[in-house]
Amino acid sequence: MAVTAMDVYKLLPKTNCAKCGEASCMAFATKLKDKEIGLEICTQLAANEFDKLADILAPAVREISIGKGAKAMIAGGDEVLYRYELTYYNQTPLVIDISDDMDEAAFDERVKKIEEIQFERTGELLTLDAIALRNKSGDASRFKEAAEKLKNANLALVLCSFDADAMKAALEAVGDERPLIYGATENNIEEMATLALEYDCPVALFVPNDLEKMKELSRTLRAKGITDIVLDPGTYVNAGIGDTLDDFIMIRRLAVEERDEDFRFPIMGVPALTWLNTEEDEVNTAIKEATIATTLINKYADIMIIHGTEIWELIPVLTLRQSIFTDPRKPQAVDAGVYEIGEVNEDSPVALTTNFALTYYTVEGDLKSGNANGYLLVLDTEGRAVDVAVAGGQFNGKAVADLIKESGIEDDVKTRKMVIPGLAAPTSGEIEDDTGWEVVVGPRDSSALADFLKEKV
Ligand code: SF4
């Protein structure tokens, strides 16, 4: 179960000395529990209390760092089974595979494509996180050569081979890049554990659909002092997808509810296995892979290896990941104020919207793609969409009057006319009364706003 502020408070000195910058130990406990402050900020803790607190504050799922410097990515870190109980931490790193048997030009082209994939949504650039090199050739020297090339890529690395000699050669080639070793199995665990310790790398444990065996092997790794472990219980992409989900859910329950030390590690999903079925055509395979990837993101995949690189396949995966890994306690909002769209002058039209991020970026995108010029007034509705803010009372005449005053828009334009969203039509009268501006009710859908501003204002 998630740690509460009271659990933390009980272990604090309770002197309310304020040396941490908080007004009380309870305020500090609340921030500590929410990961908004570090334990070391309280200098009044005795060593044993510090250790106890560090232990109860450690996430149920251990955070594993893969890669180094700007390439580093974090997998794991979650505390709860359900996002609404707290939030999910560290969005699932998305890793694209590449094979060491590709010819040089195709290999380079695929690396470039993986590095350059990006998609902008609600002001955030969504990108991939790592490249997984598969030892498909079965040849250690080819694996090493390919690894050496990937050392210069701008993403973290996952090295995939069950051959310890090939893995060692590749680890030598990438130096201190700290790739994820994938992976250790029942048959090679001693050799892979030795490599993980020698090269100080995290290691993925692959034990298909046998959680008892996984527990035993996880314990074997931990007994050797290895704490950076990723668990892969197998991804069954056809009839076995239900078993895959069962395994993922069971592992996460054991970590969160039982605090079972052998399962408190990130889970890996491998939707890329969809492509092993050569009977399907490419489009259907990509759709199936995206479906499996989004299913597994929903149910605890902390890191995933994908094969498809078409943007239409990756968009649903990237956007779902972005949506799940937002904090449900904090509305996604942009700053309230006045924003310039295109070329503006004192004769430019003025439109009004809310500061809910999805609303703002949709309106902004529609205005820009419609080549509109004008000012966009953004009202602080505490991150609520237009209809919700109208119903909740945040979209009101007084708030708009305050926004006009604080933004200084009356110094920028001669007009005293504004277009409000169609969904805010019920507030038009009070906005006119409170602001003295003429209000024009615009379209309900912002896709029609650019033309509306050009033709009707
Ligand atoms: S420094 Fe420690 S003891 Fe003092 S108020 Fe903060 S949490 Fe409490």
Image: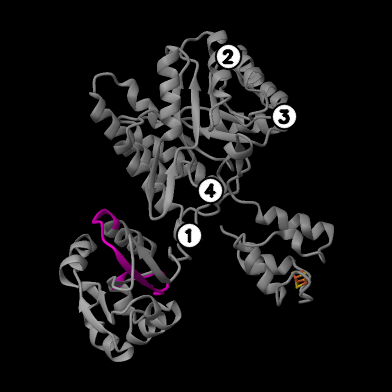
For disc 1, the neighbor class at 10 Å (few under 14, some 14 to 19, many from 20) is some
For disc 4, the neighbor class at 10 Å (few under 14, some 14 to 19, many from 20) is some
- Magenta-tinted stretch: 368-386
Report the amino acid beneath label 3: Lys
Q: Label 1 belongs to which residue?
A: 327
Q: In whole angstroms, how far apart are the C-alphas of marks 2 and 3?
A: 26 Å
* Mark 2: secondary structure: helix
Q: Residue at x 50, y 53 (%)?
A: 88
Query: In the figure, is residue 303 to the left or right of 323?
Result: right
Q: Position of residue 373 (x, y in %)?
A: 29, 63
Q: Is residue 384 magenta?
A: yes
Query: In the figure, is residue 454 to the left or right of 156?
Result: left
Q: In which quadrant of the rendered image does the C terminus lie? A: bottom left
As displayed, is residue 446 above or below residue 100? below
Tag 4 or tag 3, which sits nearer the N-term? 4
Q: Position of residue 411 (x, y in %)?
A: 40, 79
Tag 4 or tag 2, which sits nearer the N-term? 4
Residue furthest bottom as drawn = 433
Report the amino acid beneath label 4: Asn
Q: Position of residue 407 (x, y in %)?
A: 43, 77
For disc 3, the neighbor class at 10 Å (few under 14, some 14 to 19, many from 20) is few
Report the amino acid beneath label 1: Asp
* Mark 1: secondary structure: loop
Camera sees residue 144: yes
Tag shown at residue 224: 3
Q: Label 2 belongs to which residue?
A: 144
Q: Position of residue 322 (x, y in %)?
A: 42, 50
Label 1 close to label 2 by CB (< 8 Å): no
Camera sees residue 213: no
* Mark 4: secondary structure: loop
Report the amino acid beneath label 2: Lys
Q: Is residue 411 magenta?
A: no
